[in-house]
Amino acid sequence: MPRESLAERKKRAARIDRRLKRMYPAKTALTHSNPFELLAATILSAQCTDVRVNEVLPHLFARYNTPEAMAHADRDELEAIIRPTGFFRSKAKSLMALSRDLLDKYGGEVPDSMEELLTLRGVGRKTANVVLGSAFGIATGVVVDTHVGRLSRRMRFTRHTDPAKVERDLMQIISETDWIGFSHRMIWHGRALCLARRPKCEDCPLVPDCPTAADYLPVDVPLRRTQSRASHRTRSRKRASTR
């Protein structure tokens, strides 16, 4: 693909997002019923699948479903509950520390601003963006996890690997009104089709606008959609719903 201008990249990103909107929900896969639960779930999701985190959450919130309860948790019990998510010692430490911060600084309430969320121990920009977007509907940026970063480079929306720089590039080409939904849809697509080791480009309706698809398509598959749009949507939704 020839070098694109910023305007051309914006148009291509818009076309891709229109297709993604027909394929995936604009919501996080993490189960939660309030901002604190989403904050805790996002902490646990680091280096872990959302499916595994969702299996742990009912047990976690049955015991510790408020900042006060989490701040005074039995450390050994907390670690045992979240052990399946990996890095359970550091995650338990972060959960208890941020819960104490919520009590000390914000009266036990999860704040709804980027600046305040970043004062919580264990909370970085990605986690803050997830909470602001999914719990409060506030678009302050684009969530950049491993899926969003990988897909953004494959789609040549960015050449960077640093999440902050990837987010900056995406914010330039995605409409602010779509920042929240775009990241969720990219995550769903990364799980369903645009896999890390072997993307399923032969099944992907984004091929016409993806500059790296030709690198992964089988030699006998032309660089175009090989199935109907309805078939693509059905298969993609089935994949997403089982993950």
Image (cartoon, rainbow, N blue to C red):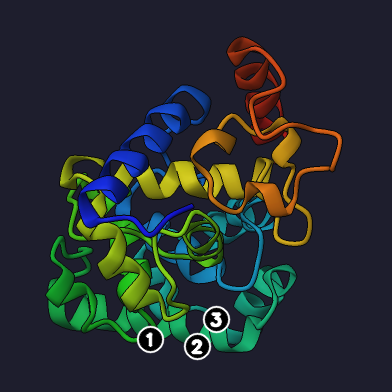
Q: Amino acid at mark 3?
A: Lys
Asked if the residue under mark 1 is in contact with the one under mark 2, i.e. CB atoms within 8 Å, the reply is yes
Dividing the picture into quarters, in which one does residue 88 lie?
bottom right
**Residue in the image at 23% along x and 79% along y:** 118
Which numbered disc, 3 or 1, marks the residue closer to the eye? 3
**Residue in the image at 43% along x and 45% along y:** 184
**Residue in the image at 63% along x and 25% along y:** 237
Cα separation, mark 3 vs mark 1, equals: 10 Å
**Mark 3 falls on what kind of element?**
helix
Cα separation, mark 2 vs mark 1, equals: 6 Å
Q: Which residue is more in the foreground, 178 or 102?
A: 178
The residue carrying pointer 3 sits among few (fewer than 14), some (14 to 19) or many (20 or more) residues within 10 Å by Cα, namely many
Q: Which residue is mark 1?
A: 97
**Residue 202 drawn at (x, y percent):** 75, 35
**Mark 1 falls on what kind of element?**
helix
Dividing the picture into quarters, in which one does residue 99 lie?
bottom left
**Residue in the image at 33% along x and 55% along y:** 4
Q: Which residue is more in the foreground, 34 or 241?
A: 241
Q: Is residue 203 visible?
A: yes
Q: Which residue is mark 2?
A: 93
**Residue 130 drawn at (x, y percent):** 35, 58
Cα separation, mark 2 vs mark 3, equals: 5 Å
Asked if the residue under mark 3 is in contact with the one under mark 2, i.e. CB atoms within 8 Å, the reply is yes
- First reached walking from the N terminus: tag 3 or tag 1: 3
Q: Which residue is mark 3?
A: 91
**Residue 22 drawn at (x, y percent):** 46, 22
Dividing the picture into quarters, in which one does residue 166 lie?
bottom left
Q: Amino acid at mark 2?
A: Lys
